[in-house]
Amino acid sequence: MDKMKIAVIGSAGRLGAALVRDYRDKYDVSGFNHAQLDLSNLDEARETLRAMNFDALINTAAFTNVDLCETERDRAFLINAEAPGLLAKICTDKNAKLIHFSTDYVFDGEKRAPYTEEDEANPISVYGASKLAGEQNVLATDSRHLVVRVSWVFGPDRPSFVDGIIKRAQENEEVDAIADKFSTPSYTLDIAEMVGRILNAWSRRAPAPDGLAAGRFQGILHFANAGECTWQEYGQWALDRCHDAAVPLKAKTVGASKLKDMTNWVARRPVYSVLCTAKYAKFTGIPPRTWREAVADYITRFYSKK
Ligand SMILES: NC(=O)c1ccc[n+]([C@@H]2O[C@H](COP(=O)([O-])OP(=O)(O)OC[C@H]3O[C@@H](n4cnc5c(N)ncnc54)[C@H](OP(=O)(O)O)[C@@H]3O)[C@@H](O)[C@H]2O)c1
């Protein structure tokens, strides 16, 4: 039986690289890094993708520098909003599915309970506004495509907060992290697994072994590991797991800093942007594992000296 054909845009990014690695043996995968497919050149992107044959296109590429987006608004909207609309059109024309990644930063952070897919988005940064416009362009083109919002993405393919705090703790006696901003880490390997379930459900050739209803996966879906935390809690858990894994550290505890102390940040960030994953858990019957388990697994696999 032919393998499902998948194209991944952003294949050198934190998430894209993880997806390509995980899917290499399961599907017929083509990955495009920034140099191979530049979403800011819509004509070229159109030409490249129209010439290809795929069943599903996964867009993990984005202009993700939240502060730079504030000063490069046009570029942010071109890459994060206009390009996803084009991808949606190309997919619809090919009768292929699009999975487009978005962010918890579409919310203003004023809520104090996890955001559901039905909650109104109200971005407070150019990055968030451009990502929201991207979601809208995708779903206005074809409501059968899928937008997956994730938060605080971490994994082995590109350093993120967790790697930064470990590095700082290896080099300094004291480290701190923000203790009044809340969200949930999302492990790229867990995202790959959950997208794999959706791809299997969509596969026209092989019925999903777990009997998932393919038609459910359209519109907006939230995915993150379970639970919520501040950056300080996230960092402390990571250092504690490093301690268990015999990773040498100078700093053992993560001190508390405040969001208002981040005077070098240009963009505003939501204070609370935890994503509710109840819809995903209901559709699949498989709730995401906790962020603590995911971070512990990451440190055991990629940092452990034992
Ligand atoms: N990172 C997070 O914490 C986070 C949180 C919530 C949502 N998300 C979303 O999750 C998705 C994946 O994020 P990530 O963490 O994997 O980000 P990432 O590591 O920054 O990867 C993004 C990739 O997009 C590429 N890219 C940038 N501009 C491009 C363009 N014009 N054309 C083609 N490729 C381009 C980048 O290439 P270069 O590096 O060469 O520019 C990079 O490889 C994104 O949609 C992001 O908005 C991320």
Image (tube, grey):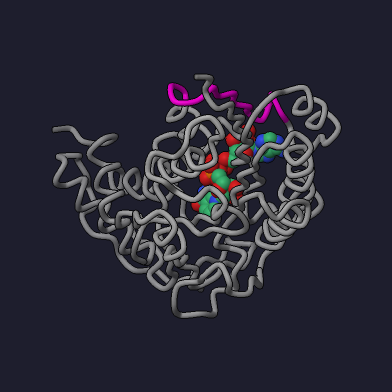
Residue 36 shown in magenta: yes
Q: Could you tell me residue 116's position as x and y percent?
A: 51, 70
Quadrant location of the C terminus? top left
Looking at the rendering, the stretch of residues picked out in magenta corresponds to 24-37
Q: Is residue 79 left or right of residue 241?
A: right
In the image, residue 289 sits, relative to residue 261, either above or below, namely above
Q: Could you tell me residue 2's position as x and y percent?
A: 53, 20
Residue 228 sits in which quadrant? bottom left
- Residue at 59% across, 49% down: 101
Q: Nearer the viewer, residue 168 or 63?
A: 63
**Most common SS among magenta residues:** loop
Q: Nearer the viewer, residue 216 or 119?
A: 216
Q: Nearer the viewer, residue 202 or 115?
A: 202
- Residue at 50% across, 25% down: 27
User: Which quadrant of the picture is home to ligand 1?
Assistant: top right
Q: Is residue 45 left or right of residue 303?
A: right
Q: Nearer the viewer, residue 70 or 147?
A: 147
Q: Could you tell me residue 162's position as x and y percent?
A: 37, 49
